[in-house]
Image (cartoon, rainbow, N blue to C red):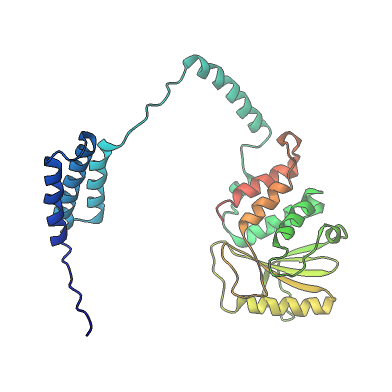
Amino acid sequence: MVPVRRSVSRETAPDRSVPNARAGLEAGALPSGVERLSERLLSLLTQWREHAEGNTLRRRLSLLLETLAPLLRVCAGTPLDAEQLGRLLPALSAVLAERRDAGEAINPWTVSGARRREVRNAAILVALWSSAEVGDAGPEFLGGFLDRCQGRLGLGLPDRNELALGYRMRVENCPGVDGSDRVDLIVETARHLIGIEIKIDAKEGKEQLRRYVEAIDRCAQQLGKDPRVILLAPFPPSRDDVIPAGWSMVRSAAAAALPKRRSEYGFAHHLIAHFAHHVRSF
């Protein structure tokens, strides 16, 4: 025989518990501090139940917060010392003035209109990864990013020695013979052809990665190089033969490419640091 489960109404069960709990309080079973808190909570639960019907969740939550507010402890802050504050403000103003004079107070990638546009940010990456445009910081930044992609699928990627032999990069390149399947970023080294598809807000298109993998494979075969495809996105790729990479890897690679001391930054280092800050929410 299948046992019959008896249902309990949501409205009747709390009605029995409230008087029982209040009876325990009246009997003096609890310390005074706990008693006051329990009284408030019982009152709150009663009001919550009475106002549940016909009231929005926002109103009920507002009631909860209004009731709990007097029970929360607020630590008094330490008052500011006027004399210390008077010494701090001029020093702080001097530091801010130095930053403004050095151009550090403005992020060029924020004001450039790159925003969260994939092609524009791909073009910025090409510039910041290029030794011709930012000097030694470029291959250091690119090498750090590829290092972080290494081993994700057991597929080899160019190391610093290979990058030292030279490399080329292109934005929105079409590796296909028919000019279709435009990949956001291509990195071509002495032994590898790497397609990097960039996603920020857009989703992966239907069969998009399959077409890119096939196009990179064909082009790499013609060049006699090893093909690789990386998806730089806030989500993993749908294919097992595509190397996953997140924007946090770009930020950490950028940080690793910078000198330890900010006083040693050159102009290129400031650009890389600003870009790492620019993509922090990608």
**Residue 115, image x, y percentages:** 57, 54
Give residue 69's quadrant in the image.
top left
Question: Does residue 185 appear left or right of residue 36 in this picture?
Answer: right
**Rendering quarter of residue 182:** bottom right
Left or right, 261 with reference to 57: right
Quadrant in the picture for the C terminus: bottom right
Image check: 97 left or right of 128?
left
Q: In this view, does 260 lie to the left or right of 16?
A: right
Residue 252's spot in the image, x, y percent? 66, 51
The residue lying toward the viewer, choosing from 159 and 127, is 159
The relative height of residue 160 versus residue 9 in the rendered view (above or below) is above
- Please report the residue visible at 22 percent of the width from the left and 51 percent of the height from the top: 60
Residue at the spot x=75%, y=78% of the render? Answer: 217
Q: What is the tally of numbered marks visible in this picture?
A: 0
Residue at figure coordinates x 59%, y 68% from the top left: 236
Q: In the picture shown, does residue 146 fall above or below 4?
A: above
Residue 137, x across and y down, in percent:
78, 48
